[in-house]
Image (tube, rainbow, N blue to C red):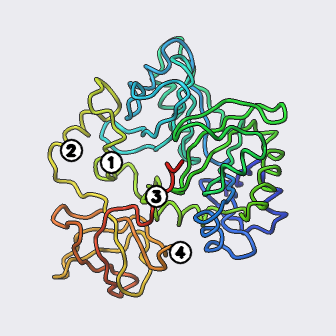
Amino acid sequence: MTELLHSPLHDQHVALGAKMADFGGWSMPIEYPGGGVVAEHTAVRERVGIFDVSHLGKARVSGPGAADFVNACLTNDLRRIEPGQAQYTMCCTEEGGVVDDLIQYLRSDDDVFLIPNAANTAAVVELLAAAAPEGITVENLHDRYGVIAVQGPKSDEVLAGLGLPVDHDYMSFVETQWEGLPVIVCRTGYTGERGYEIVPAWDVTSSVWDALAAAVIEQGGMPCGLGARDTLRTEMGYPLHGNDLSLDITPVMAGAAWAVGWDKPAFWGREALTAQRAAKESRLMRGLVVTGRGIPRSHCEVKDADGNVVGEVTSGTFSPTRKQGIALALLDRSVTLGDDVVIDVRGRDVGATVSKPPFVEVGVRSS
């Protein structure tokens, strides 16, 4: 059995009594004492929370024309943004399956910083390195940087109290310093609330966390684990790779066609995805709001009123905000918004209505 990797904040989590679990090969906090997932989720929606997401990958593509090279590989169009901005994108196979979804930070025409998912970092780096022309360097920097997410309506107060920048636009970043230490502050997140992701060097992540965590607590917030991160992202309809995106679930199927630069001359999977988009035959990702009693989970079958199987849940949970079950599901195109369906939850039929995420009010772009 492979030993789990530790984030630079592992000792802090253990000291706080966090419940730890395997996440993408890393030992990460799922929840902390003092309320657990629901309390942490509510803190983010109403006040502020702090997450350790240092398990996320980090990679750098640099050299003359690095941005053009990345743009010819990944789905989204880097020409839509300027240096200092970030963008959601996907790394696909030639068959259109998703190797990973990631955030790309455009530093300059010759420098792109990537944040893939933990378990997929090596695969993304290997694919880019294999395709890179002479002069382009692809580096796996997974253990060179930590990542701390501060999320919630009071996240500005937390960062401003430490002298960190908070006046930049959504999906933009600032490379700055905190107490003489270089950090990247990007206005991104995975919760649907206004928030930031702070990227310090690995060996100073602990100091940055301690300062941010103290400020979060002062604002009535708390440390949050990956359990709350999952309920928050599901309420927003944000996909999780391995559940809602995979080698079998393409961007077209997942409702992520907006993150594809269809007019670009080249990106991995372009031909297959263009054909799938035109055919309009594949299942599509929809939201489900449970009307009965039950909590849907991934792989639960979805049936229509006549008992015909019309899809499958990819992510399901109890929504602490709505206080009812919600899910993302791949459904046949015959199923439309507003339809009543039935989810098979452990052999019991649970009613649900087809809806369009997000399931809660969006605060991510709020000023």
Please state which amino acid type lies under the numbered disc 4: Pro
Q: Earlier in the sequence, mark 3 or mark 4?
A: 4
- Tell which tag, 3 or 2, sits nearer the viewer: 3
Q: Earlier in the sequence, mark 1 or mark 3?
A: 1
Q: Residue drawn 52% across and 31% down?
A: 85
Please state which amino acid type lies under the numbered disc 2: Gln
Q: Position of residue 83 (x, y in %)?
A: 53, 24
Q: Position of residue 331 (x, y in %)?
A: 26, 64
Asked whether disc 1 touches disc 3, contact meaning CB atoms under 8 Å apart, the reply is: no
Find disc 2 in the rendering and name its residue. 276
Q: Earlier in the sequence, mark 4 or mark 2?
A: 2
Please state which amino acid type lies under the numbered disc 1: Thr
Asked whether disc 3 touches disc 4, contact meaning CB atoms under 8 Å apart, the reply is: no
Asked whether disc 2 touches disc 1, contact meaning CB atoms under 8 Å apart, the reply is: yes
Front residue of 4/218: it is 218
In the rendered image, which quarter is residue 289 located in?
Answer: bottom left
Q: Quadrant of the N terminus?
A: bottom right
Local secondary structure at mark 4: loop
User: Badge 2: how crowded within 10 Å, few (<14), some, or many (20+)?
Assistant: some
Find disc 1 in the rendering and name its residue. 250
Disc 3 to disc 2, how far (Cα)? 30 Å
Front residue of 319/299: it is 319
Disc 1 to disc 3, how far (Cα)? 25 Å
Q: Position of residue 8 (x, y in %)?
A: 77, 47
Asked whether disc 4 touches disc 1, contact meaning CB atoms under 8 Å apart, the reply is: no
Find disc 4 in the rendering and name its residue. 320
Please state which amino acid type lies under the numbered disc 3: Val
- Tell which tag, 4 or 1, sits nearer the viewer: 4
Local secondary structure at mark 1: loop
Find disc 3 in the rendering and name its residue. 362
